[in-house]
Image: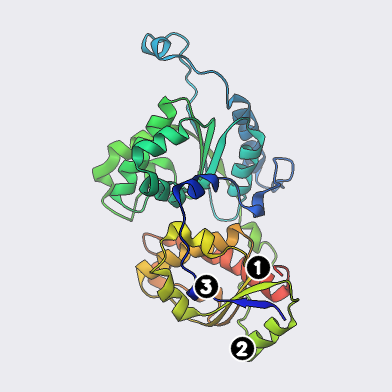
Amino acid sequence: MATIKHLTQRTPHVSAHELLSGFHPSSRFGDVSFESYRPDPSQPSQTAAVEALRAFAGGVGQPQPGPLRRLFGGGKSTEKAGIYLDGGFGVGKTHLLASLWHAAPGLRAFGTFVEYTNLVGALSFRRTVEALSAYNLVCIDEFELDDPGDTVLMSRLMRELADAGVKLAATSNTLPGSLGEGRFASVDFQREIQVLSDQFDVVRIDGEDYRHRGLPEAPKPLSDEDLIAHIEALPEDVVVAKDCFPELLRHLASVHPSRYRQLLDGIDTVVWRGVEPVSEQAVALRFVVLADRLYDRNISIVASGTAMDQLFTKEMMSGGYMKKYYRAVSRLTALAREGQQGDGA
């Protein structure tokens, strides 16, 4: 029988050094490359994106014009500091961003948007700029702005890193000039949003969610009895985190989202009893962060109760954070399918 753990009994503590050392692609994307990306033949923008990123990788680490030459216009390049992959859910943006990280030379950082904002909270803004200015490339996955503070913060961070000669790469479901729409009064922050937009050349990637191509939607949840039988059938070397879903949601409120990665250390599969729809926005947004970390680590899900595609209310799925929730449903569905098929174990 598998080893049983409980996420609700874990409260990890993470140092600033540990945060910095974790800025690399997850094991799910540890060996990806431009060659392993499979563009959809019916979507030429996917092939075009691969070529654009190959060309961008060739410029990473190249000498930039010095400050005096920039001041007087000598040697000034029209090339922007960053490349921005805009596309829907599951078209392979993270795969391509991780492929760029692997292909680029020198010191590179790879993390999600929320991990960079958490890094600033841990180190301070100035120390974060100083640390990341030593990098050749900073990759930001799932770029999105949820509030005015993030808008101002990331606008300053991207501008200062670009001025330091750092190449930037980002993925998002939203064009740079439209960041923040539906979340807050973004019209009041157009200057900061425009500064962000000015750092990037946009590459559009069209296509449908590959995780659902020709596959069923979220698998039917198991009964509580079947959950027990599933755990008993797992090999002894598998580590399972077994929790009551409502208790897990309450526990997440006591753990900072920057620590969710460490919360899952050593876990192969999560088993949730009594999954139920989430109705509170703050609870749902915390759970989205956990879903992203589960997906990063390819931790399969086995659950009873509500199906993964019914976790969020209709209002949430059509509101300002809908893109976060759609991404979470897409990823949770894939992990739940793996869990019932036994792939994660």
Q: Which mark is residue 65?
A: none
CB within 8 Å, label 2 to label 1? no
Is residue 194 left or right of 223 when viewed as pictured?
left
> Of marks 2 and 3, which one's residue comes earlier in the chain?
3
Q: Which residue is mark 1?
A: 268
Q: Which residue is mark 3?
A: 7
Q: Is residue 344 above or below residue 306?
A: above
Q: How far, Cα to Cα, is label 2 from label 1?
A: 21 Å
Judging depth in this view, the residue of 261 and 336 nearest the camera is 261
The amino acid type, in three-letter code, at marker 1 is Asp
Q: Residue 101 placed where, x, y %?
A: 61, 39
Q: Which structural element holds mark 1?
A: loop
The amino acid type, in three-letter code, at marker 3 is Leu
Residue 63, by quadrant, is top right
Q: How far, Cα to Cα, is label 2 from label 3?
A: 21 Å
> Of marks 3 and 1, which one's residue comes earlier in the chain?
3
Q: Which residue is mark 2?
A: 223
CB within 8 Å, label 2 to label 3? no
